[in-house]
Amino acid sequence: MRLSRIARSSVALGFGLLAGLISGCATTSPTINSESEPTADGLYKVTGIDADEAWAQPNVDMARYSKIILQTIDIEYRPGGETRLHRFAHSQRGPFEVPEHRRDDFRIFAEEELLEELGGSRRFTLVDEPSADTLHVTFRLLDLVSYVPPDLPGPREFSVAEYGEATLVMELRESMTEKSIVRVVDRRAAEAGDRSAHVYDRLDSPADPRRMFREFAQLFRQRLDEISELDAQSSARASLHDGHSFTIAGSGVE
């Protein structure tokens, strides 16, 4: 049976769409770029990850690790910022200065949200004791800015599109040796999403800053899940270059 020109075109279009869907569904796994310059501590660039930048040891096999210890939480704030909300402001301005008396609260929010997020991981179990299959995890937020006003005198209508932004740094080290095996750096905004049109009447409550750290905790877990797909096969490709001479370059994160 012959197909008409229109029918043949429809079939070709159908196969093209199917191929596009299959291609679109395909995901790329993180891979170590063995041709990149290593950092001072011997990490190589990782490609195939959504983060801005990532590095890993050339022989790392993340399948070896099943446990994590949350070792360090560090938050560094951008200096300056507005100290109060303008009298008639009803929408996002700033960034606002985070006063010293709120920074202890912010660190508590970060720890609580991070522990809750990591506690729900299907890939890693939170533990307290180091072992051969356990990683020390460092969570750092650098250059944090907040778009949530620090204090509001009484009920006040105000809406935000973003809670804040920061550079997220994730460091993974072997718990027995403290050898650094993975570093991920990612600059992101904690967006309010569908809450951007929501009107807040009491922004001096801790609920809204907590949401900001919940967003960063979720991003941290996403990056941890992504980098955990590094396996011996991708690492082996990098180890082929172990005997070569490289110029040592810094990672940009101390």
Image (cartoon, rainbow, N blue to C red):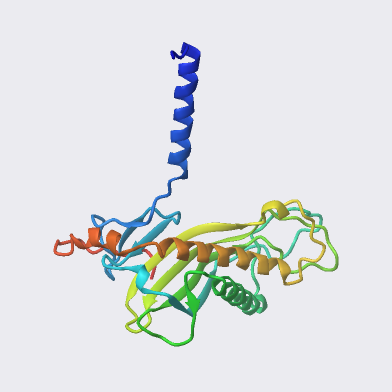
> Residue 98, position in %: x, y?
64, 70
Using the rendered image of the protein, determine whether residue 79 is visible from the camera's viewpoint. no
Q: Is residue 173 left or right of residue 233?
A: right
> Residue 135, position in %: x, y?
40, 77
> Residue 231, position in %: x, y?
33, 63
Residue occupying the point 49% across, 83% down? 127
Quadrant the N terminus occupies: top left
Q: Count every numbered label the image shows and give the total.
A: 0
Q: Is residue 156 left or right of residue 173?
A: right
Residue occupying the point 30% across, 68% down? 60
> Residue 210, position in %: x, y?
67, 69
- The quadrant where residue 246 appears: bottom left
Q: Is residue 93 left or right of residue 170?
A: right
Residue found at the very far bottom of the displayed protein: 129
Q: Is residue 84 above or below residue 9?
A: below
Residue found at the very far right of the displayed protein: 155
- The quadrant where residue 239 appears: bottom left
Residue found at the very far front of the displayed protein: 1
- The quadrant where residue 19 appears: top left
Residue occupying the point 47% across, 44% down? 25
Q: Nearer the viewer, residue 46 or 85?
A: 46
Using the rendered image of the protein, determine whether residue 15 is visible from the camera's viewpoint. yes
Q: Nearer the viewer, residue 42 or 154?
A: 42
Q: Nearer the viewer, residue 53 or 247?
A: 53
Quadrant the C terminus occupies: bottom left
